Each structure stands twice: as C-alpha cells, then as structure tokens.
Image (tube, rainbow, N blue to C red):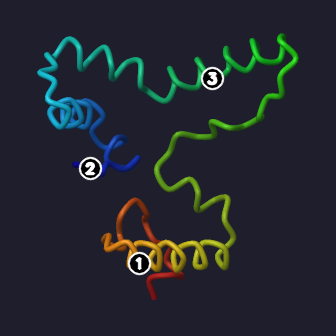
Amino acid sequence: NILWISYEDLSANLSGSIQRIASFCGIDAGAEAVAAIAESSSFAAMRSMAEEMDIQAALAGRSVKKGHIRQGEVGAWKEVFREEQAARFARHHEERCSQLGLPGELFVSKPAAATQ
C-alpha cells in the first residue's frame, strides 16, 4: 500500500494530513498527539532544527548545504525556475508519471507556460 501525499496537501491542512498518515499506518492518533506532531512539523520548527543541525555539522568540520530549507511556500519553485526550465520539468514529470502509470498531476502544479 502506498499513500500519496504532497507538500501542497500538507501545507493546506497539516493536522488533517497527519491524521490521514496515522490512519493509513493503522495508528489511532488522538488530537493531542496530532497537535504536537503538527507543531514539530511546521516549517518554522523544521527550519530551526535544520539550522541547529547545520551549526553542529559545521562545528564538527562537516560540510553544510546553505539554503537547503528555503521558503516553505507552496509554488515558490516558480520563482527559482526560468519559464523554459519549468516547462521542461513539467514535461519530464508527466512522461515519468505516464511510464509508471501514475496521474500526471501528481505532486506538481504546472507552470502557466506548460499548461497552454
């Protein structure tokens, strides 16, 4: 069994998505547990944790990828990709989904240029 869930799903309804994941795994998660998980899974909490881990890695002499956790906003990738890159990505994504028998809209919101 596979549960498909997207960042957009998580962003739109984090607590509901956590409950959906728990149910899929056969876990009876109460409201208190879901709320605690949602708080720990928020973008702000994850960014803070990543920054602390980066500090520890740097102090230990390990390399750190700067800017790994970016904005935490749905669709922010559109600001990073040029129009041609976004269109190429959308085509590749649709081709791979088709090859795997998955719906083409899975996990991606198409840029305007790719949907015309």
As drawn, the label of residue 108 is none
Sequence-first disc among 2 and 1: 2
Does residue 88 appear to the left or right of 8 in the view shown?
right
User: Which image quadrant for residue 60?
Assistant: top right
Q: Nearer the viewer, residue 45 or 97?
A: 97
Callout in the foreground (3, 1): 1
Residue type at numbered disc 3? Ala
Counting from the top left corner in percent of width and height, residue 44 is at: 52, 24
Q: Is residue 50 above or below residue 88?
A: above
User: Which image quadrant for residue 94?
Assistant: bottom left
Q: Nearer the viewer, residue 77 or 93?
A: 93
Q: CA distance from mark 2 to mark 1?
A: 18 Å
Counting from the top left corner in percent of width and height, residue 28 is at: 11, 21
Q: Is residue 65 above or below residue 90?
A: above
Q: Is residue 32 above or below residue 22?
A: above
As drawn, the label of residue 99 is 1
For mark 2, what is the residue?
2
What crowding class fits label 3: few (fewer than 14 Cα within 10 Å), some (14-19), or many (20 or more)? some
For mark 3, what is the residue?
50
At horizontal 20% and vertical 29% (from top left) the residue drawn is 22
Does residue 7 appear to the left or right of 71 in the view shown?
left
Q: Is residue 85 above or below residue 5?
A: below
Sequence-first disc among 3 and 1: 3
Secondary structure at badge 1 equals helix
User: Quadrant where the C terminus lies?
Assistant: bottom left
Residue type at numbered disc 1? Gln
At horizontal 59% and vertical 40% (from top left) the residue drawn is 71
Counting from the top left corner in percent of width and height, residue 19 is at: 19, 31
